[in-house]
Image (cartoon, rainbow, N blue to C red):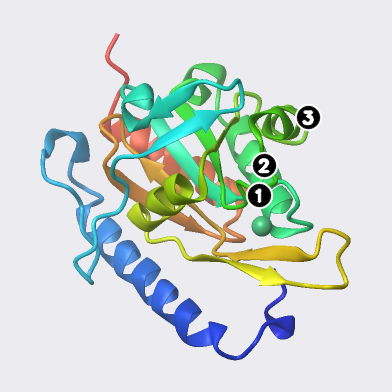
Amino acid sequence: MDLSKRPIWLFPALSAVIALILGALIVSSQLNPAPREASASSVRTAEGVTLGGPFTLVNHEGETVTEETYRGTAMLVYFGFTYCPDMCPASLQLLKVALDELDADERAAFQPILISVDPERDTPESLAQYVSGSAFPENLVGLTGTLDQVRAAATGYGVYFSRVEDSSLTSGYTVDHVSVIFLMDRNGEFVDIFPHGTAPTVIAQRLQRFLQDNPVQS
Ligand code: NI
């Protein structure tokens, strides 16, 4: 996503999303010392929006999945698309670098998930090929669905995306989207957010801190 090429009307929308993220960061930092999984209530941002929530999508193996599918494993949720030329692959590569800083047991506690914001092109088959890329996290799961299903999932996470016509591309369009990674706990509750460009070492430290606060029950 290159902001300099985007129409001016996008900026108010992006500002609203950034305000949402900052709100989430503030809530996150306030709650950090407490063991969050003990709380049954949903974490809310300063704007009163609950992050996360239910979704029904199709994974890259063609199976229908919901948020319940991943209960018991902390999710690292990223919204993006396989045709994205820069931000998505960069983010997923940085996430792999971060996860590679963990030991195998720690890494197994997290399920990285790419939710497509371009379901028209991102079929389960194309996602399967994409998520198997060696530069991406080993166990990365790709999810897609109908546009309505994807939009519902994105709305739950406060994620903005928009199809933008671009005649210079052979496909005729691209998708603008916010590039952030959400850490959700084993109950699907929001824990932390990693804005685009967060250093892998920082992500790794915060994932390890999450595991210290919320040890895996053996
Ligand atoms: Ni992207």
Residue 26 pos. (x, y %): 28, 66
Q: Residues within 10 Å of mark 3 (few under 14, many from 20)?
A: few
**Residue beneath the point at 77% across and 36% down:** 135
* 77 horizontally vs 201: left or right: left
What is the C-alpha distance between the residues marked 2 and 1?
A: 7 Å
Secondary structure, mark 2, is loop
**Residue beneath the point at 67% across and 79% down:** 3
In the image, the residue with mark 1 has its CB under 8 Å from the nearest atom of ligand 1: yes
In the drawing, what numbered circle is on residue 81? 1
* 69 horizontally vs 169: left or right: left
Residue 59 pos. (x, y %): 54, 28
Residue lying at the far bottom of the rendered structure: 8
Label 2 with label 1: CB-CB less than 8 Å: yes
Q: Earlier in the sequence, mark 3 or mark 2?
A: 2
Quarter of the rendering containing residue 140: top right
The foreground one among 212 and 187 is 187
In the drawing, what numbered circle is on residue 122? 2
Q: Check disc 2 and give the amino acid type.
A: Asp
Quarter of the rendering containing residue 87: bottom right
Quadrant in which the N terminus appears? bottom right
* Vertical side of 213 occupied by 192: above or below: below
